[in-house]
Amino acid sequence: MKKYIFLITALMLFSCRNADRHYDASGTFEADEVMVSAKANGTITRLNVEEGQELTQNQNVGEIDPKTVELQKEQVIASLDAIGQKTNSAIPQIQVLQSQYHSQNASISVLKEQLQNAVRERNRTANLVREDAATRKQLDDTNGLIDVIQKQILAAQTQLKTLTQQISAAKENVAIQNRAVLSERKPTEKKVEQIDELLKNNTIVSPISGMVLTKYSSEGEFATVGKPIFKMAGLDLMTLKIFITGDQLPKIKTGQQVKVLLDKGDGKTSEVPGTVYWISSKAEFTPKTIQTKNERANLVYAVKIHVKNDGYLKIGMYADVKF
């Protein structure tokens, strides 16, 4: 009789245990890990990160010695200064020509005044000739003086045009000479911009907001491009990876809202929402560390669920899911 009671009790406990399994799958939480590697060669002069430390996106956490790159920048800037010294100036030559221009212009003004006086003198002499008070020769001399002054004014104006052309030619010649020199300036300025971009690589920053998982380098070590410095993960949005059997596959789809059950201890659980965002298109053998609702399933499909983290979720934590 006691044997029957024991068997009945065992069956009741087993059935109760199976009845308590109100979930469809189980899995563990993961996070998208980001490897922060060196972008420059040099000694790490500063690195303010520790494992478990929370970082914000674009936070400055360290520096790789930028001395070599800074020297390259100084060299390029010196080349820019040298280019500036190679340029010629037309100002001294133009100042001489402009002085001659102003002098010639003043001469023309004097000649025009002399011409006016000569014309008045000719008119007065002509009146005297008509009254027989002056000789014809005096009138001819006055007309000859007017011709001479007019020719002088014409020559001076021609010289004025020549000076104007010389000033323009001087400006153009210097511009042509400087154009060849200044053509080197723009590429050199671009080199400065490139070096400024390289200098940014000497600063170590956090690419995302999250927690430092592993620290690979320390201050004083020599970093090379691509060498890991530390690894971190964003913990605001966690990924719960589960495995489902083939008969469960038709019940879920991407974008579906599911219930994620978390163990709070003392036999209590809490429920948080999750969203299915990835379903494997290929079946695989059940991993040894993963349990499915159907213990006898050999082939399963991996499913990933996004769950917002309120600070309680940790990498590696187990959770159950109800579809």
Image: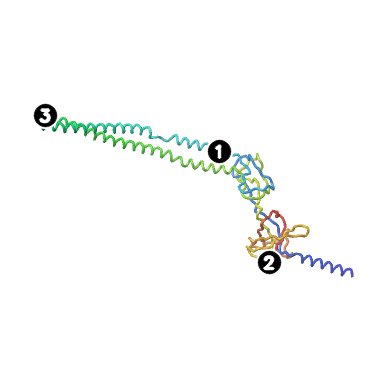
> Residue drawn at (68%, 55%), measured in percent from left and top?
310
Q: Which residue is mark 1?
A: 70
For the residues labelled 2 and 1, say whether their Cβ atoms are less than 8 Å apart.
no
Mark 3 or mark 2: whose residue is earlier in sequence: 3
- In the image, is 113 to the left or to the right of 241? left
The amino acid type of the residue labelled 2 equals Gln
Question: Within 10 Å of the Cα at label 3, are there few (<14), some (14-19), or many (20+) other Cα atoms?
Answer: few
Q: Which mark is residue 310?
A: none
- What type is the residue that disc 1 sits on? Glu
Q: Residues within 10 Å of mark 1 (few under 14, many from 20)?
A: some
* Residue 51, horizontal then vertical, whole percent: 69, 47
Q: Quadrant of the C terminus?
A: bottom right
What kind of residue is marked 3? Ala
Q: Which residue is mark 3?
A: 133
Q: Secondary structure under badge 3?
A: loop
Q: Give the label, 3 or 1, closer to the camera.
A: 3
Q: Secondary structure at mark 1?
A: helix
Q: Earlier in the sequence, mark 2 or mark 1?
A: 1
State the count of labels: 3
**From mark 2 to mark 1, how far is it between C-alphas?**
61 Å
Quadrant of the snapshot with the N terminus: bottom right
Q: Do the CB atoms of the residues marked 3 and 2 lie less than 8 Å apart?
A: no
- Where does the image place residue 52, in percent across and percent down from the top left? 69, 48
Q: Nearer the viewer, residue 66 or 148?
A: 148
Instruction: Name the residue tied to disc 2.
Output: 248
Of helix, strand and loop, which one carries label 2?
Answer: loop
